Image: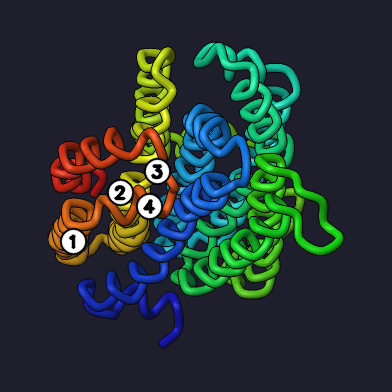
């Protein structure tokens, strides 16, 4: 079935499963980047406690970069799907082009922060010079080379808007595999590669993200034939940008508030590094679970937007109903796993002195996943 026909004719419950599984896997793999880095860094021969603490402190900014990239992508996704549902190919080309223009602006902001603002940000959360040094090294690399995660997020949503979510998942899998392979090589030093510690974790992460972005750019150019690809469509159009953020801004704010909450908790726990680290590690597990709901939301959005463009009230109602049902199922599964196996996660991170704090936090806070997931959907 052609992609446009699939969006018009396939039963919504089947369409949501077909589109949702790749998107859920994609979001889960995105959360895996931070979990994998923490797992390998936690098992460094020396300085592992300080390194885990450093990665906890950089996490809010990483979340914020992902929030802005994904939120812009969500707005692009919904607007592009709706425009294609209306059969307006020229506007669709402008929507795609303006999203890439926004990606350039977002990257410039991240670059400037990476050069000038990182050390002050890390220093606001700790007085430990070793943690400040490690956190600054890691976050500076992630910000300066953040074009990978930003443009991956945009190309991912451009593919999802046309029903090609499988290809976005392939790109995410490639990036995750690259990251997992490079992490031990660059963190511990294997063969001719010197031991780089947290710097190695950062380089492995951004290389994986760039690999994903390049692959999705190729898929976008080859497969998204419903609209024209031309640099002229990157010319900023204030009307289109407003439409993108009218949809995407709530998603950005929702995830940005999570970043702010983690940052504030880091400030509160500033003089208890073990509690600070435990909270950061738990939040990475929580992010993994909630990203399943975000992935399903990204399947719901283009389905409903396309149906809105078609003026199909029934498909809109079906999209909302099945989206909520599937989200509840995923969140109940997440609660069960985190309540039953908190010790396994603590062992994965080699949590050390933070172990008891981590397990206690997981058992209490994971109950809220159901309500948070419904809110995301």
Q: Residue at x 71, y 37 (%)?
A: 141
Q: Is residue 32 visible?
A: yes
Task: Count residues near mark 1 (Cα–Cα under 10 Å), then give few for <14, some for 14-19, many for 20+.
Answer: some
**Image mark for residue 347:** 4
The mark that comes first in sequence, 1 or 4, is: 1
**Image mark for residue 333:** 1
The residue singled out by tag 2 in the image is: 290
Q: How is colour applied across the structure in the image?
A: rainbow
Q: Residue at x 23, y 72 (%)?
A: 12
**Residue 123 placed where, x, y %?**
59, 14
**Image mark for residue 284:** 3
Vertical order, 343 against 46 (above or below): below
Q: Is residue 320 left or right of residue 173?
A: left
Which structural element holds mark 4?
helix
The mark that comes first in sequence, 1 or 3, is: 3
Q: Is residue 21 left or right of residue 273?
A: left
**Residue 156 placed where, x, y %?**
54, 59
Between residues 141 and 346, which one lies in front from this camera angle? 346
Is label 2 or label 4 in front?
Answer: 4
Vertical order, 373 against 309 (above or below): above
The mark that comes first in sequence, 3 or 4, is: 3
């Amino acid at each position: 079935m052609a992609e446009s026909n699939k969006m018009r004719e396939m039963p919504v419950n089947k369409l949501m499963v077909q589109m949702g599984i790749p998107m859920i896997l994609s979001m889960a793999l995105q959360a895996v980047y931070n979990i994998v880095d923490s797992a390998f860094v936690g098992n460094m021969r020396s300085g592992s406690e300080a390194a885990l603490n450093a990665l906890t402190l950089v996490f809010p900014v990483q979340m914020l970069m992902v929030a802005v990239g994904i939120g812009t992508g969500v707005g692009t996704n919904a607007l592009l799907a709706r425009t294609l549902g209306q059969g307006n190919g020229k506007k669709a080309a402008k929507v795609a082009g303006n999203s890439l223009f926004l990606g350039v602006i977002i990257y410039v902001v991240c670059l400037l922060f990476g050069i000038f603002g990182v050390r002050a940000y890390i220093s606001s959360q700790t007085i430990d010079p070793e943690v400040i040094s490690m956190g600054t090294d890691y976050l500076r690399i992630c910000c300066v080379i953040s074009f990978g995660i930003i443009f991956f997020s945009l190309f991912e949503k451009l593919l999802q808007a046309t029903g090609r979510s499988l290809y976005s998942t392939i790109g995410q899998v490639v990036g995750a595999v690259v990251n997992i392979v490079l992490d031990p090589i660059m963190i511990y030093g294997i063969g001719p590669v010197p031991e780089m510690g947290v710097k190695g974790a950062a380089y492995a992460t951004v290389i994986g993200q760039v690999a994903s972005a390049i692959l999705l750019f190729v898929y976008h150019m080859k497969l998204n034939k419903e609209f024209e690809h031309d640099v002229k469509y990157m010319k900023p159009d204030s009307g289109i940008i407003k439409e993108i953020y009218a949809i995407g801004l709530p998603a950005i704010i929702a995830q940005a508030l999570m970043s702010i909450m983690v940052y504030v908790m880091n400030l509160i726990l500033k003089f208890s590094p073990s509690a600070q680290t435990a909270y950061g590690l738990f939040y990475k597990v929580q992010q993994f679970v909630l990203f399943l709901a975000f992935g399903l939301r990204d399947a719901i959005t283009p389905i409903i937007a396309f149906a809105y463009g078609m003026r199909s009230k029934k498909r809109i109602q079906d999209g909302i109903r099945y989206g909520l049902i599937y989200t509840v199922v995923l969140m109940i599964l997440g609660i069960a796993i985190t309540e039953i196996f908190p010790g396994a996660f603590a062992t994965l991170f080699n949590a050390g002195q933070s172990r008891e704090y981590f397990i206690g936090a997981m058992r209490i806070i994971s109950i809220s996943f159901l309500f948070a997931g419904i809110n995301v959907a």
